[in-house]
Amino acid sequence: MFKLLCRDGRARRGEYITAHGTIQTPVFMNVGTNAAIKGGLSATDLAAVGCQVELSNTYHLALRPGAEIVRSLGGLHRFMRWDGPILTDSGGFQVFSLATLRKITEEGVSFASHIDGRRLFMGPEESMAVQSALGSDVAMAFDECVANPSPRDYVAASCARTARWLVRCRDELARLNALPGAVTPTQDLWGINQGGTYADLRIEHMRAIAALELPGYAIGGLAVGEPTETMYGIIDAVEPHMPPDRPRYLMGVGTPGNIIEAVWRGVDFFDCVLPARNARHGHLYTRDGRINLNNKKYEADPLPADPACGCPVCQKFSRAYLRHLLKADEVLGLRLCVAHNLWFYNDLMAQIRLAVEEGRMSDFRGRWAERLDRRI
Amino acid sequence: MFKLLCRDGRARRGEYITAHGTIQTPVFMNVGTNAAIKGGLSATDLAAVGCQVELSNTYHLALRPGAEIVRSLGGLHRFMRWDGPILTDSGGFQVFSLATLRKITEEGVSFASHIDGRRLFMGPEESMAVQSALGSDVAMAFDECVANPSPRDYVAASCARTARWLVRCRDELARLNALPGAVTPTQDLWGINQGGTYADLRIEHMRAIAALELPGYAIGGLAVGEPTETMYGIIDAVEPHMPPDRPRYLMGVGTPGNIIEAVWRGVDFFDCVLPARNARHGHLYTRDGRINLNNKKYEADPLPADPACGCPVCQKFSRAYLRHLLKADEVLGLRLCVAHNLWFYNDLMAQIRLAVEEGRMSDFRGRWAERLDRRI
């Protein structure tokens, strides 16, 4: 259940209540695709970097270890020992981005596993069955995520099908939640807006899915190739048609600047693999922009990654040590860099929440949106 | 400084006092070759798995990041943020096992770096310079480690040279410790016994180096290809000639059973990459022997790796989760498995210490030496 606490322009400060705790929004969800954070962070480390919500993936976990195994072990919370809220992506995006030999019908999608080529099928019911077995707090609707740009006719037909799939998702999850032994019987379903880069299709689809009065809505199919300004334009177009009393989740976005701009436009939830991917390449976020530890000038630098940072990594380790670990291919380097970047993202959200509460979001945006995205 | 607290047969219970804390022996040193534990464990994790002494490598750190960089950052303790005792291996073994195009002279060894092929030279003085810059608590002598078996004549000549090198190591480290700005001016030098599998050469060499009255002595050049019984035979032959009031370190050994057998024969210090290597392959130590998480029977197993284990990993995570992480190539799997295996080794040493104190070492050995080495 979502509680809107206050607004600053279109930016919102809220709370989303789940059986595993209350999420303060705007929030960044920390990505643990395979029920594990990249770089070797455990659930305990997640708490230490200020994570509020963990995000896992239906497609990946359905393939490995399999939903029924996770269910038999008490669900995802117990499996990975994360007691806080979990959102699971539906597998829709991965079926379209990772799997091969796809065939889409009204029923769903048949495809070949990217791991072993085995032939599989996933439709709305299958996605809900997996997410119910995982027992996440929020299940995402099974949708088709089209590439940008795609032909208008194809996008329109795809949106209509995704809307029909949403009804099936809702009915199936309601049925699963009511079964005795449901892992998380309070599991919520969030709908996903699609429509490519066609503002009118986006709006039409948003209105259609808003009518289902689901507990949350996402904007999907952005940050998949279109220019950033196009993405902001779509958010501007769709947002007025999203129910104001439900959380809004911009899927797979983005840089710190993207997040500030999207909060400014009324978005509450985010997730992105960028902090982990940048960490892997030695790119660490700081208040002055992104530093690159591969730069030789950090070879003997005794300073922490960001001297202004309060994260556990910056309390202990120097740039020189982190750089050495990355150069020596020690996974500790990856782990510490991921921890720093996730802390940075989670802390950014805490600062955004404060700015919204105090009516300083315009100033905050002007000061930080471009600065944090710089490479220095 | 070593304090022998008590004996049980030839097994010894002692303390080794360093500027960074007192080590209770017998002890297993946890290997962090590149100033990092394999699998992404940080110095904080090391403490959590019961580590008393960390071991880093002169050869690796001289190549990357370079000794002067570590010195400029305050030495190895500060660089990796491990406040406990550190022993550094001299680089001798690695020059002979990793580097290529070696040429040995009385001066030392010229070789090509295994990283970038760059031509380098290391002799007793260079090894001491690096170890002094790293600021470990114990520096190991620069020696030649011959393969087993090697021709007797070669081994005899090599031993004589290693003994001459030891005098140079001692003189050079004394000089470096006395310099203003020495990182760890109390740095101790331990000598290394060589002699291949020739008991008489071993004894002769041991007597020669014992005459230098160094603060500790190692048996090197074992567990490099010879049968286990040969190794035990060499320990039996050499041990009576090692100064009883100095610690004995059996380099690079071994399995839990090997360690129990060597403690039984009077050894105090150990190090080995086996716990980490086994962890990488999903082989976890338990009180009943070694389990292999790749076995499908663990796919949905809710038990911890070892239900009798008190380690942080076994307090939280199931075999099924660990197996999933390894299968999904998540480095968290590696990290948790390494942590469990290191805890197992460190805990084994704690149990050994208690058995020696209580005069139960014969019983302990009979009960555990073979059992712990089983694959189940």
Image (cartoon, coloured by chain):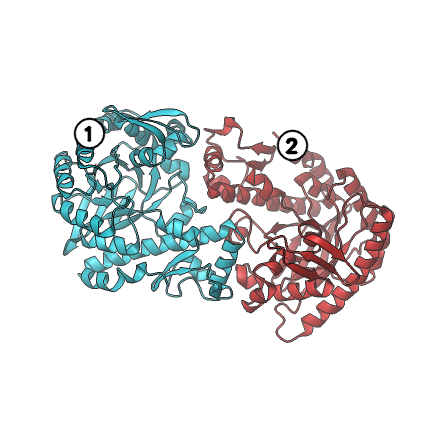
Chain colours: A red, B cyan
Which label number is shown at residue A374? 2
Identify which residue is drawn at 54% across, 62% down: A79
- Give the amino acid at mark 2: Arg
Expressed as whole percent of the image width and height from the top left, the position of residue A162 reads 79, 58
Locate residue A130 relative to residue A40 in the image: left or right: right
Locate residue A302 relative to residue B7 in the image: left or right: right
Quadrant location of the N terminus of chain B in the rendered image: top left
Q: Disc 2 and disc 1: Cα gap in Å?
A: 58 Å
Element carrying mark 1: helix
Question: Which is more toward the observer, A370 or A107?
Answer: A107
Q: Residues within 10 Å of mark 2 (few under 14, many from 20)?
A: some
Residue holding disc 1: B161
**Observer able to see residue A87:** no
Expressed as whole percent of the image width and height from the top left, the position of residue A272 reads 65, 46
- Give the amino acid at mark 1: Arg
- Is disc 2 in the same subunit as disc 1? no
Identify which residue is drawn at 12% across, 43% down: B241
**Observer able to see residue A47:** yes
- Chain under disc 2: A
